[in-house]
Image: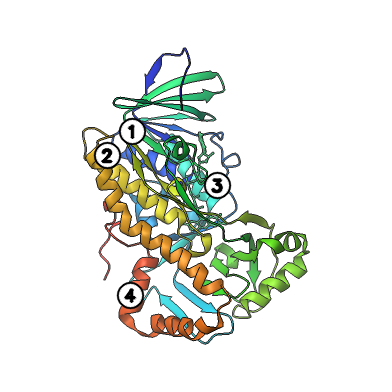
Amino acid sequence: MNASTSAAPEDAGVLIIGGGLVGASLAIALDAAGIAATLVETAAPRVDAQPSYDERNLALARATVNGLDTIGVWRHAVEKATPIRHIHVSRSGEFGSARIDAKKQGVEALGWTLPARELGAALLRRLDECTHLTRLAPTTLAALEPLPDGWRATIKTPDGERVLDTPLLVGADGTESFVRAQLGIEVERMDYRQTLFVCTITPERDHAHRAYERFADEGPIALLPLAERRCGLVLTVDTKDAEAVAALDDADFIALAQRRFGWRLGRLDRPGKRHPYTVHGVAAKQLIAKRAVLVGNAAQTVHPIGAQGFNLGLRDALTLAELVAATRDPGDAAMLQTYAERRDVDREGTMSMSHGLVRLACLQQPLLAPLRSLALLAFDRIPPLQRALAKRGMGYRGISPVAIREHLP
Ligand SMILES: Cc1cc2nc3c(=O)[nH]c(=O)nc-3n(C[C@H](O)[C@H](O)[C@H](O)COP(=O)(O)OP(=O)(O)OC[C@H]3O[C@@H](n4cnc5c(N)ncnc54)[C@H](O)[C@@H]3O)c2cc1C
């Protein structure tokens, strides 16, 4: 943990390590509140350099888009986004299905689909407008040392080492967070033994702004609506089959996707380049330490099946920015405790929903099938249950940050 260098320490304000989707959003939210901060990111500030500004298609909950709008990011992304007006959840071989309809919930969209690279581009454009923020990229945090009133960080820049002092250290450095390890925060890991293949396809029938999630014993498949009648496909396979699936030619890959998804949208066609992702589940055992806090994937990395990772991480970032803006000392222990308490319900609920979805929907447990079908039917037919599901799907759970709130009918 020792930081030893001859450079004189500089005052960093709030120090955010990691400028991925969540760290960048936090930096922007703090800047919008007039708070001085420094953002340290290993990758160069270009969409093609940043690891998570890639080809994955993000399903952004309605609440997330409200939040991105409040902090001035959405205007840079809206033209590339596709509204989700209906959600259809089903399981192959079982009779139940759950459908959520935006109109029935009194909203014009339940959420939006946006390629991560487009969200990344919008964040970079918005970061360029920040006036209270120092951006250091490509720069890597190399060491940390505790101070009586904060942390001293040694960072490696292309021009050599620098030393930064901060009253609040934020770990936004992703699933294998260096900050988390340095703080001695333990994690719980879930090995799902699954690999996701992400690509675009064009179905025969128009998606009509419907997002599909279909479960099967072999794993789930999701289709998200995109522009120009294309769909973002997410196909989950057992990791032991991943190499074989990667080696399939386009026709065989489409045949596999078609078997899993069925014929709701007619023939699936024109697959784009396939991108594989190994699925990790990681949950930090605590969110805060003295004058330090974890957000986004560093705090919890959830299975992408529920499309919750960034949605949850943005709520981390916006809650933290709101609390820091209301406190004189950004590293105040009571404020950090409030942060941890406020994030608890949303975090625990979203993590157990994502984990539960995987267990319930993917594992081969024939005895559960009727219950599963009944649950799906209940969500489909019983308005209060559907309302609760829709509200969560739109990103409202626990005490929401002010930036995402709206009056829902
Ligand atoms: C296939 C797939 C589909 C997904 N779909 C959805 C979806 O539909 N909806 C949704 O909400 N979420 C989705 N997610 C999850 C979402 O992508 C993540 O939750 C989100 O990217 C997490 O952002 P983050 O900023 O916390 O972490 P990351 O994006 O991992 O960013 C961490 C950053 O920290 C930097 N860093 C690391 N160490 C250091 C260091 N020592 N010094 C400086 N910088 C450092 C890294 O370079 C990186 O840029 C999906 C994920 C996958 C894999």
226 sits to left or right of 309:
right
What residue sits 52% from the left and 78% below the top?
A: 90
Mark seen at residue 324: 2
Q: How far from the left and from the top, in percent, is residue 59? A: 48, 61
184 sits to left or right of 213:
left
Mark 4 in CB contact with mark 3 (< 8 angstroms): no
User: Within the image, what quadrant is residue 232 found in?
Assistant: bottom right
**Hey, what amino acid is under mark 4?**
Arg
Residue with the mark numbered 3: 52
Taking depth in this image into account, of 299 and 311 the one nearest to the observer is 299
What residue sits 45% from the left and 81% below the top?
A: 376
**Hey, what amino acid is under mark 2?**
Val
Q: How crowded is mark 3: few (under 14 residues within 10 Å), some or many (20 or more)?
A: some
Among the two numbered marks 2 and 4 on one chain, the one whose residue lies closer to the N terminus: 2
User: Within the image, what quadrant is residue 56 found in?
Assistant: bottom right
What residue sits 55% from the left and 74% below the top?
A: 214
Q: How far from the left and from the top, in percent, is residue 374? A: 44, 85
Q: What is the CA distance from the residue labelled 2 to the residue labelled 1?
A: 10 Å
Figure coloring = rainbow
**Hey, what amino acid is under mark 1?**
Leu
User: Within the image, what quadrant is residue 34 found in?
Assistant: top left
Disc 4 versus disc 1: nearer the observer = 1
Mark seen at residue 273: none
Taking depth in this image into account, of 74 and 367 the one nearest to the observer is 367
Q: Does the residue labelled 3 lie within 8 Å of ligand 1?
A: yes
